Each structure stands twice: as C-alpha cells, then as structure tokens.
Amino acid sequence: MSFDVDIRKRVGTPGRHFQLNVQFRTDARRTVIFGPSGAGKSLTLQAIAGLLRPDEGAILVDGQPVFDASKGVDLPARARQLGYLFQDYALFPHLTVRQNIAFGLTKGWFNPARQAGGAAVTRWLRSLQLERVADQWPHQLSGGQRQRTALARALVNQPRALLLDEPFSALDPSLRARTRRELQARLDDIGIPMLMITHDPQDLERFGDHAVAMKDGALHPLPAWPLDEADEGPDPAR
C-alpha cells in the first residue's frame, strides 16, 4: 500500500487564513504524520480520506488517483475504500454498539436495525472483544470500548488502509499507554496498513515505521520543534 500526496489548500476567513502545502510519499506499513496543534495534519488526513477537497494537486493510493485537480478526479470518500477513525470516535449516541458498527455497511443515512450487519458485524464484535457490550449505548462504554467500537465500524467494510485522527487524545492520560498497546496488538492481528496523525511523540515512537513531520502547513525535518511540546487545544487546521 502506498500513498502519494502532493496538495495545496487555502482555508480561513478574510483577514485570517491557513495555507496547506504538503508533498510526501510512503509505502510503509505504518506511517505517522507528526506535528504540533495547528500544523495542518487533520486537513491532510481529511483530504486523503475524501472529506476535504484540495485546491490543487493530486493524491494517489496504490498508484491510482483518488484526487487529481488537473484531471477533474475526485472520488467520494466511500469509493476510496479507506477506513477512518475520528479523533472523538464520532459514535452515534442513539445507536447501540452493534448498530454503530453496522452503520459502516449502510448506504445513506437510515439507522441500522438492532440486529443489523450479520456475519460481518459479528466478526468484528468477536475480534475486538465487544460481544458482551454489543447492545449497550456509547455512554455506557469505557474509553477503550468506544475506541474499539469506532475501529470496528472503520474496518467492517474491509478497507484497504486505515486512517487514524489523533486516536488517543480523547482518552485520559492513564489509559493512553494501555490503549496504545491494545491498538498495536489489534493492528498486528489484522495486518492492515495504517496512516496516523498525532502531536504525541509516544505515538510516533510506537507506530512510526515512517514519519512525516509537519509544521505551519508544510513538511519539516524531524524534529522541527521540541518533542515535548504540549498540544495547544482544538484547531481547525491541526
């Protein structure tokens, strides 16, 4: 699995703007895009996933263009076959664990039935040890269970790669080390290529077979800033 990214995107409002200008290539099994808050990491991941349209450039996945501004190519997110794990997991509070996972198989916006999904959902409930909480609601789950539910939803369609947006930042610090180990074990079992964005050097150390460092919307050599730099909070272009 390879990613070739060469994109430009300008975002913001009059008097305040952010310019994204990113070029990198990776065929590593696990790639981490690393940088401080406001670096443009999420914009880059959203563009790869098909959730954000760049102004210029091209994105190739396994050598095939999923976006090319010059040729008018812009595949919708579902057609790119990339699983996406949101930073806050984005679970639907009115759906059970089973229904949240089954939503990944749903076309359109209709809520899945309580027993929807069949063998595909059952497989991921079992694989990610969610069977006993399958009929619970997201607010009844632990942080690790919520992450595994979101991971199952991202994987149920058998994507060709998994995109992770700051996957541990929603967890209490005491849970992060354990959940990192757990996610690493799951990814080892599944064997799926992964592209992660993070501001945390511990994520980079554990998952960064290949590292792409970003700051101020562009690539920088590692390290381009103190590795213990704290996250400055939410930012639309983080």
Image (cartoon, grey):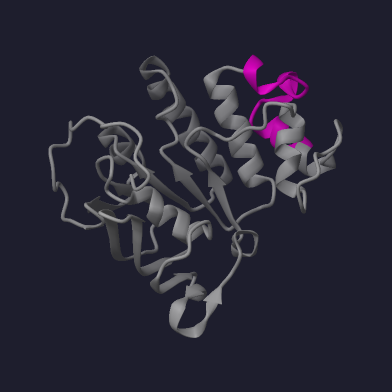
Picture residue at 66% right of the left edge, 52% below the top: 158
In the displayed orientation, state which residue is furthest to the front. 14
Q: Horizontal and vertical percent for residue 123?
A: 74, 38
Q: Is residue 143 visible?
A: yes
Q: Please state which of residues 223 and 71 is positioned toward the viewer in this rendering.
A: 71
Q: Please state which of residues 123 and 100 is positioned toward the viewer in this rendering.
A: 100
Q: Is residue 29 visible?
A: no
- Say left or right for 219 vs 60: left
Picture residue at 75% right of the left edge, 26% below the top: 96
Picture residue at 46% right of the left edge, 54% below the top: 46
Magenta region, residue range: 122-140
Displayed quadrant of residue 135 = top right
Look at the picture and state if 2 lies above or below 225. below
The quarter in which the C terminus is drawn is top left
Is most of the magenta stretch helix, strand or loop?
helix
Q: Horizontal and vertical percent for residue 84?
A: 55, 47
Look at the picture and state if 66 lies above or below 143. below
Look at the picture and state if 120 lies above or below 122. below
Residue 26 lies within the magenta run: no
Picture residue at 53% right of the left edge, 56% below the top: 51
Residue 126 lies within the magenta run: yes
